[in-house]
Every structure is written in structure tokens, then in C-alpha cells.
């Protein structure tokens, strides 16, 4: 496959399954939001809180995605299969331990979290039902996440797509039945998400055991010190980046909740539309991660420079398509989520910002992938921290005091633009040393 990476056709062939897989990851939340939004606005507000908190606990640990992809791809390029097995096994054990730890810490504290999030008393009960079921299934979500990262690091993007498709289909069907036929409410929606991820974990784990590079001796493989240190070092920096990025989304939802239930429902819909586009583009970023890690490990910088230009263009095209779709068909897109006139009115106040930001931010997401592949985890953490303190906090403060949903989204977009500029400067310096 590497010989095709110099062509747009080859890069698209590598990216397309990752795009589909990345698109399906947030599709569960998008579909849940659409189903719940058309069912009941108060349910949607409760879902917004539950999704915000549980997503924060997932995104905070997205080093379970990026660290394994980068290291496994690099080790595969070097032909070091023993270290590859060690890294994969340690990543799984780490995901399992973190999943259990989250339950122990956050289940007793959930009431305090709802209070901090300024949850309206009328939706606390529904929020608690959704969050509790999702929290107890978080261990399977993290394990499935790691398995997908391992498969992508092995460049088995078709397999990753297949298992995400299976998990998402299960979630969608169960969520629909829970709301409209079984009368399970948000409890059924949460169970559907957990069940889908559990099945996805089992299927992907079997695939890993069958892989020729990793499966032989995987269960009995020794986790060596270097694998632990490498994953932990990368994870520490990615965790720092994820902490500030996740806090941005967490605080944005808190401020939306402070403004009102209608604004919170509008924010949840906007966030799912935003994340759907970003995760779609993340499929191209995954290609950048794989290519950078593989070619950097083989010291092929000149070839890498040309390939990254092509990957950046793919990101720009995707961003343009989303911007055009949102600009030309806004009512078709928004109508999938709600028919509540008050919610749609609040969304329309912000919609122009969503449209014009799609193209530059799509490139920012792709550049993130390049940075991961180049092992620039420390730089990513530092840039995200700077964006949080210099841009996000001042703007979100105005959003809170003025009760403005527009300022909430200006704050989020400003962080993305900062990432675009700083990542581009770093990559340029790295490729022209």
C-alpha cells in the first residue's frame, strides 16, 4: 500500500475507510440527538448534560487512540513485532484500568457534577439515568477505542470501519426501539450505546488475535519497560492536550446550561453537527498520522513533504463540502434534529459561524494528525494550553456574563484557528530542518 501513498488515489484509498470509521464514531451521538430531539426537548437537554460529561471522560483519554496508532505504525515500519505486541497489550490493560477507575471516582460524585453544570431540577432524574448507565459501560468503550487504534496502526482501516459500523448499527436500532416502542427512555438510549461498543470490542479483539503481525504470542507477550515508558510519555502529553480541549467543550455546555434549557438544547444540536464534521475529517488526519509515523521512522522526509501537501488538500476539500452543505441546506440538516421553533431560532443565531469555520478548521484537524505522526505530542499540549488561557477563557467569560450562545461558539472556533496556525508553523519547521 505504501507505494500508492504518493498519489491522491492511493491516499484516498487509505483515507476513505478511516473517514467512514471516524464518521461512524460520533454518529451514535448524532442519531441519539436526532431521535431524542424529535421525541422531547427536555429529554434532549438531559441528554446534552449526560453526553457532555461522559464525552469529556472519553476525550480526556484519547491518548488511547493517538499513542497506539503512532507507536504501532512506527514499530511496524521498523519490523519490531515484539515491541508492537507489548505496546498493544499494555494499551489494552491501561484502557481497562482507566474504565474501572472512572466508575470508582465519578459514580459517587455525579450529584456534584450535575450541580456544577447548573442542571435544571426538572431534568436531573433523566440526566442521572443516562449518565449512570453510560458510566458503567465506559470500560468497554475505552477498550473498543484502543482496539480500533491498534487496527489503524496496523493500517487495517477496513476492519476498523466494519466493527464501528456494527457497533453503530446496534446502537441506532436499540435507541430507536427504546424510545418509540419499548418505552425505556434515555436508559434504553444509554444501554444501546454500551451494547454496541461491547459487541464492537469483542469483534475487534478477535481480529487482533488473528492478525499475522500481532496475534501470534499476543496473550502471552511480556509487556517490556520501553513499551510502557513510550506509551506513558506520549499519553501524558496527549492527556494534557485533551484535558484543555475537553474542558473547552465541558465549560461551553455549562455556559449553555446557565443560559437556559432552550439554549442548551440548541447547543447540543450544534455540537453534534460540529463534531460530525470534525470526526469525518479526522479520517484524513488518521492517514496523516499513519503516513508520518511510518515514513519518519524510515527517514523519508522528502517523500513525506510531498504526501502531506496532498493530505492537506483532501482536508480542505472535505471542509469546503461541509461548508457548502450547511450553507445551502441548513433547514434540511437542522430538521433532522428538531422541529421546535424556539430551538431552531437560537441555532440560526450561530449558524453562520458554523458555516464559515468549516474549511479552515478541517485543515487544523488534518494538521493535528501530522503532529501526532511526527511524535509532537508535547507541542500539541502546549499549544492547546495557550489557546485555552489566551483565547477560550476570556471569550467564554463574556458568553457567561452576557448569556450569549454566539460567544460560546466564537470561543470554540477561536481555539481551532489557533491550532491551525501553530500546527502549520511547527510542521513547516520540522520538514525544512
Image: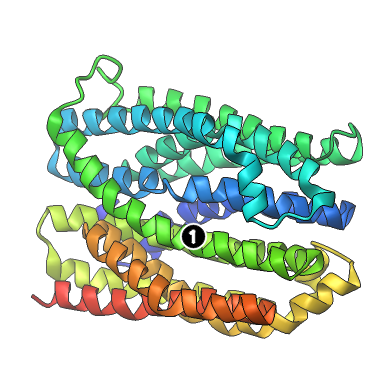
Dot 1 alpha-carbon crowd within 10 angstroms: few under 14, some 14 to 19, many 20 or more: some
| Residue visible at 55% across and 32% down in the picture | 200
Residue nearer the viewer, 158 or 187: 187
Q: Locate residue 76, reporting x and y percent.
A: 21, 41
Instruction: Find residue 97 and report its image quarter.
Output: top left
Compare residues 122 and 248 and report the one nearer the observer. Answer: 122
Asked whether, in this view, residue 424 is left or right of residue 193, the answer is left
Whether residue 331 is visible here, answered yes or no, is yes
Which of the image's four quarters has the C terminus?
A: bottom left
Q: How many marks?
A: 1
Rendered position, 182 above or below 325:
above
Residue 174 horizontal/vertical position (percent): 76, 35
Left or right: 388 as drawn, with respect to 129 = left
Q: Secondary structure at mark 1?
A: helix
Q: Answer with the quarter of the image where residue 422 lies.
A: bottom left
Residue 183 figure quarter: top right
Residue at the spot 30% in from the left edge and 73% down from the top edge: 423
Residue 316: in sight, yes or no? no
Q: At 70% across and 62% down in the image, what residue appears?
A: 268
Vertical order, 118 against 402 (above or below): above
Read off the residue under disc 1.
Answer: 247
Amino acid at each position: 500500500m505504501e507505494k500508492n501513498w504518493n498519489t491522491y488515489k492511493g491516499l484516498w484509498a487509505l483515507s476513505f475507510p478511516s473517514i467512514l470509521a471516524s464518521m461512524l464514531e460520533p454518529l451514535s451521538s448524532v442519531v441519539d440527538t436526532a431521535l431524542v430531539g424529535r421525541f422531547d426537548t427536555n429529554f434532549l437537554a438531559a441528554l446534552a448534560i449526560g453526553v457532555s460529561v461522559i464525552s469529556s471522560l472519553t476525550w480526556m483519554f484519547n491518548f488511547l487512540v493517538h499513542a497506539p496508532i503512532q507507536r504501532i505504525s512506527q514499530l511496524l515500519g521498523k519490523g519490531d513485532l515484539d515491541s508492537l505486541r507489548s505496546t498493544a497489550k499494555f494499551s489494552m490493560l491501561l484502557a481497562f484500568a482507566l474504565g474501572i477507575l472512572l466508575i470508582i471516582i465519578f459514580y459517587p460524585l455525579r450529584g456534584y457534577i450535575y450541580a456544577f453544570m447548573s442542571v435544571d431540577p426538572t431534568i436531573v432524574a433523566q440526566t442521572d439515568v443516562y449518565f449512570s448507565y453510560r458510566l458503567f459501560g465506559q470500560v468497554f468503550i475505552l477498550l473498543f477505542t484502543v482496539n480500533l487504534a491498534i487496527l489503524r496502526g496496523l493500517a487495517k482501516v477496513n476492519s476498523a470501519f466494519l466493527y464501528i459500523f456494527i457497533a453503530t448499527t446496534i446502537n441506532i436500532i436499540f435507541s430507536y426501539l427504546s424510545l418509540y416502542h419499548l418505552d425505556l427512555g434515555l436508559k434504553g438510549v444509554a444501554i444501546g450505546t454500551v451494547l454496541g461498543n461491547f459487541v464492537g470490542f469483542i469483534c475487534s479483539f478477535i481480529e487482533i488475535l488473528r492478525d499475522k503481525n500481532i496475534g501470534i504470542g499476543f496473550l502471552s507477550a511480556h509487556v517490556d519497560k520501553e513499551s510502557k515508558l513510550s506509551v506513558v510519555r506520549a499519553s501524558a502529553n496527549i492527556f494534557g492536550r485533551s484535558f484543555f480541549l475537553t474542558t473547552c467543550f465541558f465549560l461551553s455546555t455549562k455556559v449553555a446550561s446557565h443560559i437556559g434549557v432552550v439554549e442548551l438544547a440548541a447547543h447540543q444540536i450544534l455540537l453534534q453537527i460540529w463534531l460530525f464534521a470534525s470526526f469525518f475529517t479526522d479520517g484524513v488526519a488518521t492517514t496523516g498520522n499513519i503516513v508520518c509515523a511510518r515514513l519518519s521512522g524510515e527517514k523519508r522526509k522528502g517523500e513525506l513533504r510531498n504526501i502531506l501537501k496532498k493530505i492537506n488538500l483532501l482536508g480542505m476539500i472535505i471542509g469546503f463540502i461541509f461548508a457548502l452543505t450547511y450553507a445551502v441546506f441548513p433547514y434540511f440538516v437542522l430538521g433532522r434534529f428538531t422541529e421546535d421553533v424556539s430551538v431552531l431560532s437560537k441555532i440560526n443565531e450561530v449558524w453562520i459561524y458554523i458555516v464559515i469555520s468549516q474549511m479552515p478548521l478541517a485543515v487544523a484537524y488534518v494538521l493535528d494528525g501530522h503532529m501526532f505522526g511526527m511524535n509532537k505530542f508535547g507541542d500539541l499540549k502546549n499549544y492547546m494550553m495557550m489557546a485555552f488561557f489566551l483565547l477560550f477563557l476570556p471569550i467564554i467569560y463574556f458568553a457567561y456574563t452576557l448569556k450569549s450562545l454566539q460567544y460560546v461558539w466564537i470561543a470554540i472556533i477561536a481555539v481551532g484557528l489557533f491550532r491551525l496556525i501553530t500546527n502549520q508553523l511547527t510542521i513547516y519547521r520540522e520538514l525544512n530542518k
